[in-house]
Amino acid sequence: MEQKTTTPRVEVADAIRGIAVAMILLIHSIEHFNLYNQTDPDSPLMRLCDQMVWDSLWFTVAGKAYAIFALLFGFSFYIMDRNAAQRGEDFRLRFCWRMVLLFLFGCLNAAFFCGEVLVLYSIVGFVLPLVCRMKTRSLLILAAILMLQPIEWLKMGYAAFVDSNASILQFNYSPYWNRAMENLENGSFLDILKSNLWDGQIFSLAWAWGAGRFMQTASLFILGFVVGRKALFANTTSNRRLWGRALAMALICFFPLYGLSSLIPAFAKTLTLEMVEGSPLSLLLSKPFMTSLMLVISSLHKFCFMTVIVTSLLFAFYTTRLERPLRFIMPYGRMSLTNYITQSIIGAFFFYHWGLHLHVCDTLSVAIGISILALQILFCRWWMSRHKHGPLEYIWKKLTWIY
């Protein structure tokens, strides 16, 4: 049976988690929850607005919102593990059971949204019980290795020294993607449900593998655990100095990395045209090599930008008047599981064939997302004023401690 602890919540984590879930909702809205059936407006002004909305959201949100979510996932594991240790319990086996439950929640979400992430988290989450007793220094080294995408370096080595035209450790998910998209556009509710649970999950996990999300997520889980272990979310002078240095380093690294992600493909194309086929340098410019190299660079610059977002929110919460609006969204962050799954259901109703099947431009799409977000925040504030946990959070907690 679960035993209660008196450890206070880390409020800034709830605020940051709320921002992350809100960002996820907005990026999913302009993607039409993976259907990508947007329409182009007739007005040049609206087309300009669409381009601004699309570019700004992809720059600030894509690849960063899930990264923040993953960081806080590892942080939450530390809190639960620490609380269990204070009661004289070992939480690791129970956390494995908790991941099984998360897999089931992920399947529920996947039935409505074929691009969901909870199943990935439930798989990668088993890393945490395996490494959580390691020393902090070892954890940081492991997290750094994972963030550098070791699988991609293996692919680059194979392309450079074995076969420059071969792609290894890749999965062709195109047939699954095509079937899933066909059902989203034309299928009934049951057709979409079945396709999402099979085709959607296969292509989602295969895409995550190909996009380096398995390695990156494991790294962020570990970093979040270290943040908890070192109490880095506490509002102390030493922590503010550390986060200030992290912010400066992230900004210094982000711009050259982001620039390289644009410059390298063009530079490689120019060199390829001038080079003799089969020369040593041409092997390094092969498509498999360049794909892996760009993935490593992309993973790093997104991590840097995520660090900028997290540190900025920490400073805003602790040192500016923005603390009040961030506190306003805290109930939304405390109900992240409920909100993540319900936004998938609502979004599927708006954009998939079984629902309203809207074909709208990016600007209207993000307006729909903001409307859903506003309603969710109001509901969360009402619910959390009467309950200690969100609906799905309560079920997850009870099932975690069922034995």
Image (tube, rainbow, N blue to C red):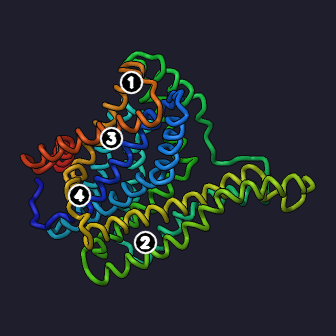
Circle number at residue 139: 2
- Element type at marker 2? helix
Q: Which residue is mark 3?
A: 370
Disc 3 to disc 4, C-alpha distance: 16 Å
Of the numbered discs 3 and 4, the one sitting upstream in the chain is 4
Q: Residues within 10 Å of mark 4 (few under 14, many from 20)?
A: few
Q: Residues within 10 Å of mark 2 (few under 14, many from 20)?
A: some
Of the numbered discs 4 and 2, the one sitting upstream in the chain is 2
Disc 1 to disc 4, C-alpha distance: 37 Å
Q: Which residue is mark 1?
A: 193
Q: Is residue 349 above or below residue 172?
A: above
Query: The residue under label 3 is which amino acid type?
Result: Ile
- Element type at marker 3? helix
Query: The residue under label 2 is which amino acid type?
Result: Leu
Disc 2 to disc 3, C-alpha distance: 38 Å
Label 1 close to label 3 by CB (< 8 Å): no
Q: Nearer the viewer, mark 2 or mark 3?
A: 3
Tell how many labels.
4
Q: Residue at x 25, y 54 (%)?
A: 94
Q: Residue 58's x, y, as percent?
A: 50, 48
Of the numbered discs 1 and 2, the one sitting upstream in the chain is 2
- Element type at marker 1? helix
Q: Residue at x 38, y 19 (%)?
A: 354
Q: Nearer the viewer, mark 1 or mark 4?
A: 4
Query: The residue under label 1 is which amino acid type?
Result: Leu
Disc 1 to disc 2, C-alpha distance: 39 Å
Q: Which residue is mark 4?
A: 325
Q: Nearer the viewer, mark 4 or mark 2?
A: 4
Label 4 close to label 2 by CB (< 8 Å): no
Q: Nearer the viewer, mark 1 or mark 2?
A: 1
Label 2 close to label 3 by CB (< 8 Å): no
Q: Residues within 10 Å of mark 1 (few under 14, many from 20)?
A: many
